[in-house]
Image: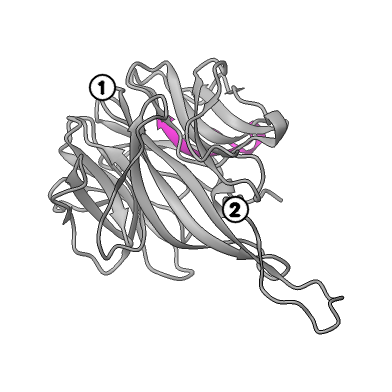
Amino acid sequence: MKARPLSSRTLGVLVAVVLLSTSSQGLAQEPRVAFLVDDSAGSFSPEGKTIVFTRHFSTLLYGLDTHPVPSRSVLITMRADGSRKRVLRQLGVRFEYDPSFSPDGLSILSVRDDRIYVMRRDGSGAYQVRRDSLEQACPRFSPDGSKISFWRGRPGAKPGAYYVMNADGGGLRRIVNARDRFAWGCPSWFPNGQRIAFAKDYNLYVSSADGTNVKQITDDKDGTFYSPAVSPDGDWIACHGTDSRYRSGIIRMRADGTGITRITVSRKGLEGDGGASWSPDGRRILFTGHHGRFEGAGVYVVNRDGSGLRRLSNIPG
């Protein structure tokens, strides 16, 4: 049976472990609380000099909890080399995630407490795109900035669907039912704005932007795939998942689903965990990775051929 996407796993210790209590005899080993931080990759800015990503804060009670529970998340920008990190502070916001730059680089699109928002690049002037009773996730601007693709669904166990709407929140159109209660990664636009790649049930699909033509480009014999990202020239897709031999990592394939190649290996336990995106020149791939649940996820970058792997955030040490 195939596992859920790695994004359902939580990760690593940032701060030293603190003992909660001890027994009167001093013999029983008590649970311990660890304070965790995990970074999730967002996107490059259009000029390629800046990266926006999410930092999740959570706690894990060892011996009792299976996974940490996020208590807050914020957006952070940094230079493409990992320097000059800056928090985009938003008062009163608990969770902010799934960030990406607008095509002109002047704005950042993100999810704030399950609703889609747009703000200026410096974090100011935020406004909600569409008022909605349903949860929203994984928004991405079309190449010309006129539309937004995203996932939308009801809380709980009911399935959601992928949608496209106008950038002002109007013109909502369902592209395809997701058949699950969570998104398998953000949809990704082709550069001509006419097609969208998305993941569903561990496979990749390509749809016309109006949802009238949907084609599955991978199947179970190829491996498992999620979080697709279309290259700037439209010829390639990078994603997370496993190849046909069930080796995990960042996967690169042609836009028609052929030529599947794993370009990262589990070096010292490194595993991909969602959020793949391309640099504007198509030479590098940004992604989230981790070395096990007790270290913490970080933002990584790798060349499209798998060379030059580098961690840019949440560096242990």
Q: Residues within 10 Å of mark 1 (few under 14, many from 20)?
A: few
Q: Position of residue 27 (x, y in %)?
A: 87, 75
**Residue 227 among magenta residues:** yes
The residue segment tinted magenta is 218-229
Q: Would you say 58 lies left or right of 26 here?
A: left
Q: Would you say 58 lies left or right of 105 here?
A: right
**Residue 13 among magenta residues:** no
| Residue type at tag 2 | Arg
Q: Would you say 4 lies left or right of 52 here?
A: right
Tag shown at residue 37: none
Tag shown at residue 9: 2
Q: Position of residue 256 (x, y in %)?
A: 46, 24
Front residue of this view, candidates 37 and 158: 37
Q: Are marks 2 and 1 in contact (CB under 8 Å)?
A: no
Q: What is the CA distance from the residue labelled 2 to the residue labelled 1?
A: 32 Å
Identify the residue under disc 1.
47
Front residue of this view, candidates 78 and 301: 78
Say if 313 sits above or below 164 in the image: above
Q: Would you say 264 lies left or right of 74 here?
A: right
| Residue type at tag 1 | Glu
User: At 34% across and 47% down in the image, what residue appears?
Assistant: 75
